[in-house]
Image (cartoon, grey):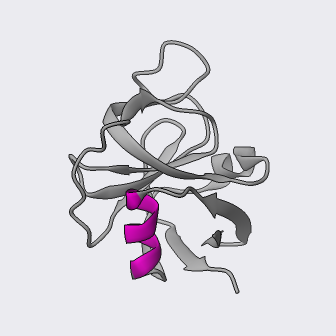
Amino acid sequence: MKIEIRIDDIVLAGTLDENNTARQIAAILPIEGPANLWGQEIYFEIPLDIALADDAVAEVDVGAMAYWPAGRALCIFFGPTPVSTGERPTAYSPVNVFGRIDADCRVLKQVADGALVRIRLMQ
């Protein structure tokens, strides 16, 4: 399943994985929220309460989209975070990865704290 992520003038396509977290997120799209920045991670609270998945991880790939159960938040990782030990993004605590950005996501470095993030299914 393909999604569109829009933040100000930035528009990125993403692909959802075939897992329970992705299905639950797809079911509530479209969603929007104010961007919170934590290093090179954008996150915002969403109206879902999903349990930590069996395959949850803290270290993810650049471009990963994940759900953070501890904060009930959708996360987009585009580089190192304050707890990363290298160039790979590391979540504050384990996350359920549910998809990825399909293009170079370094453009997300331009996003300001509080910018409106909109995510919708693509037709």
Let me know if residue 77 appears in the view: yes
Q: Residue at x 68, y 81 (%)?
A: 122
Residue 72 placement (x, y as % from top left): 25, 57
**Identity of the residue furthest to the right in this view:** 103
Say if 75 sits above or below 23 in the image. above
Say if 32 sits above or below 103 in the image. below
Q: Quadrant of residue 40?
A: top right
Residue 86 placement (x, y as % from top left): 56, 14
Q: Main secondary structure of the magenta part?
A: helix
Say if 9 sits above or below 90 in the image. below
Viewer-nearest residue: 19 or 3: 19
Q: Quadrant of the C terminus?
A: bottom right
Q: Is residue 24 left or right of residue 79?
A: left
Q: Quadrant of the N terminus?
A: bottom right
Tell me, yes or no, whether the highlighted magenta stretch contains residue 24.
yes
Find the magenta span and give its range.
20-27
Q: Residue at x 23, y 51 (%)?
A: 71
Residue 51 placement (x, y as % from top left): 21, 51
Let me know if residue 7 appears in the view: no
Residue 15 placement (x, y as % from top left): 65, 60
Viewer-nearest residue: 113 or 55: 55
Viewer-nearest residue: 83 or 69: 69
Q: Quadrant of residue 10?
A: bottom right
